Image (cartoon, rainbow, N blue to C red):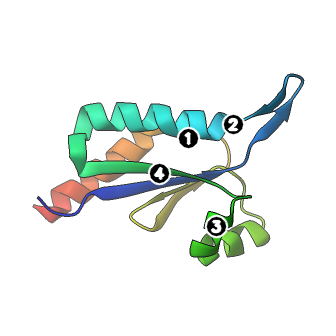
Amino acid sequence: MADAITVRIFGVPVVCSEGVADLWRNVANQAQGQLARRFGERVVVEYYDLMSPEMDRFPEVLAQISSGAQVPLVYVNGELLSQGGKVSVPAIAKHISNLLERAI
């Protein structure tokens, strides 16, 4: 099997009346489940908190945030697919399908 397609979702915890909620991490977990059902092990979903020390590994993401990009940022195999608004699993799945078709 070829290398898995990597979906990376970058977000931040959200402050709400009940405290701090890690909504984007929850969304990433839901996306992982949906994409795994459709693509199996061919897709891996990773979530990164923009405030975490791990972000040093992603200077291109930090540069985009500094330039005004909105969370969440969604990358598929290193390519920015979307920013701001919502995480669209159908859009991610369509992009993955296109990548897999080109790989055949």
Seen in the picture, residue 51 relative to 11 is either above or below; the reply is below
Mark 2 sits on what residue? 22
Residue 25 appears left or right of 34: right
Q: Position of residue 39 (x, y in %)?
A: 24, 41
Quick check: can you spot residue 18? Answer: yes
Q: Residue furthest top?
A: 18
Neighbor class of circle 2 (other Cα within 10 Å; few <14, some 14-19, many 20+) is few
Q: Are marks 2 and 3 in contact (CB under 8 Å)?
A: no
Mark nearer the N terminus (1 vs 4):
4
> Would you say the residues marked 2 and 1 are in contact, meaning their CB atoms lie under 8 Å apart?
no
Helix, strand or loop for disc 4: strand
Q: Nearer the viewer, mark 1 or mark 4?
A: 4
**Could you tell me the amino acid type at mark 2?**
Asp
Tag in front: 1 or 3: 3
Q: CA distance from mark 1 to mark 4?
A: 13 Å
Q: Which mark is residue 46?
A: 4
SS assignment at label 2: loop
Please give the residue where the numbered disc 3 appears in the rendered image: 55
Residue type marked 1 = Val
Expressed as whole percent of the image width and height from the top left, the position of residue 103 reads 16, 64
C-alpha separation, residue under disc 4 versus residue under disc 3: 13 Å
Other residues around mark 3 within 10 Å, as few (<14) / some (14–19) / many (≥20): some
Q: Residue 7: which numbered mark, if any?
A: none
SS assignment at label 3 = helix
